[in-house]
Image (tube, rainbow, N blue to C red):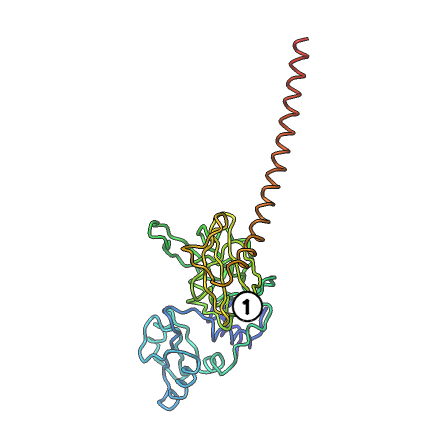
Amino acid sequence: MNKEEILKKFNITKNDVENFDLDFLSTYLKFHHKKEYGKSSILFWGFDKKEVQRLNEIAISSALDIKKRYSENITFICVNKDFNDDAKLAKAKKGNSIVLDLSEFEFIFKNREYNLLENTDFFPKKEISEIRIPIPLSNFNYEIETESYSAESDKTYKYNLYKQQCECKEFKENSDYEKGDLRRLCKHLLYEYKNSFKPINLNYFTLFLISNDISLKRYLEYFSIGELEFPVYVSYSNLYDWVNIFFPNENGKYKVYGYNKLEKRFSYNDKPIGYVPELRSKLNQIFESKRNKTNKTKSLNNKGKTGCGTSILILIIIVSLISFL
């Protein structure tokens, strides 16, 4: 089997071919490939009834939706080597479908475990491991245009999941985080990541954020409270007073609370009963220390400005006296 040829059908670039072995890439492509609508689908051409039954079993075990008729939105078309309907083949190649021969289909969709998360090159090397996410490879290198999610705006934004870039304001605030850091994904990228890339086997907190379309703000802090087994996460930005608190229950499932860091109050008085005093203490430690640093910086800046102004005033007085004499 020609490695380059099969990967070319999935739009995998030479760089990815060189960085990952064929077994990794084939497993990746089985689970992560471009989908036009929802579930991946497949159509078989040119196989007898017995062979189709066997291939259907492989497709079903790989979570593929089996189609009986051609349409432009079918993800894969598997073609027997004896199939000679050139008109159908030409139509398939012009459409959005990926055309595979039998050996390619069996190789990509053979029974294999999802062990991609063991490859450290598939992740950024960040300190907060809970928000590392697998990095889409070059088969997701295409531009998408979407309308603003705000009902009051008629703007459109272009974004690219492979480059993890978007034109929206939310992305610009966190654009310096590296690819694979969940904080980098704005709501547009997050939506595409969830629906097209379809992440698998992530930790519960990361999966919770992605499943619920919750993009993170600029900063993320986490800490333990009481006897809770799972940490509490706080996501905030210096541009806004409101922060998000992700609070776990005993099963590791999270609930989001809104908290105003200046007014020190919970949104609609909705708060984690039984943990509020300790939680407030932790929040005060985070935001009071930052407020003190900001005040110190302002104070130093003011002193610097005062000193400069005083020196200029003295110089003006001296010059005036000399002129008078």
Q: Residue furthest bottom?
A: 50
Which residue is more in the foreground, 151 or 301?
A: 301
Which part of the image, by quadrant, shows the C terminus?
Answer: top right
What percent of the width, then of the height, locates residue 66? 36, 80
Q: Which residue is mark 1?
A: 228
Q: Is residue 274 left or right of residue 307?
A: left
Q: Residues within 10 Å of mark 1 (few under 14, many from 20)?
A: some
Q: Quadrant of residue 70?
A: bottom left
User: What residue is rendered at 66% in x and 25% in y?
Assistant: 311
Q: Is residue 281 above or below residue 72?
A: above
Q: From the viewer's perspective, is 323 left or right of 235?
A: right
Residue 209 at x, y percent in the picture: 47, 64
Q: In this orientation, which residue lies closer to the viewer: 239 or 253? A: 253
Q: Nearer the viewer, residue 11 or 41?
A: 41
Secondary structure type for disc 1 = loop
In this rendering, position of residue 286 left or right of residue 55: right
Q: Position of residue 107 (x, y in %)?
A: 49, 81
The spot of residue 75 in percent (x, y) is 39, 73
Residue 16 placement: quadrant: bottom right
Seen from the viewer's position, the closer of residues 33 and 220 is 220
Number of callouts in the render? 1
- Farthest residue in the top direction? 325
Q: Amino acid at mark 1?
A: Leu
Q: Residue at x 55, y 68 (%)?
A: 228
Q: Is residue 292 above or below residue 3?
A: above
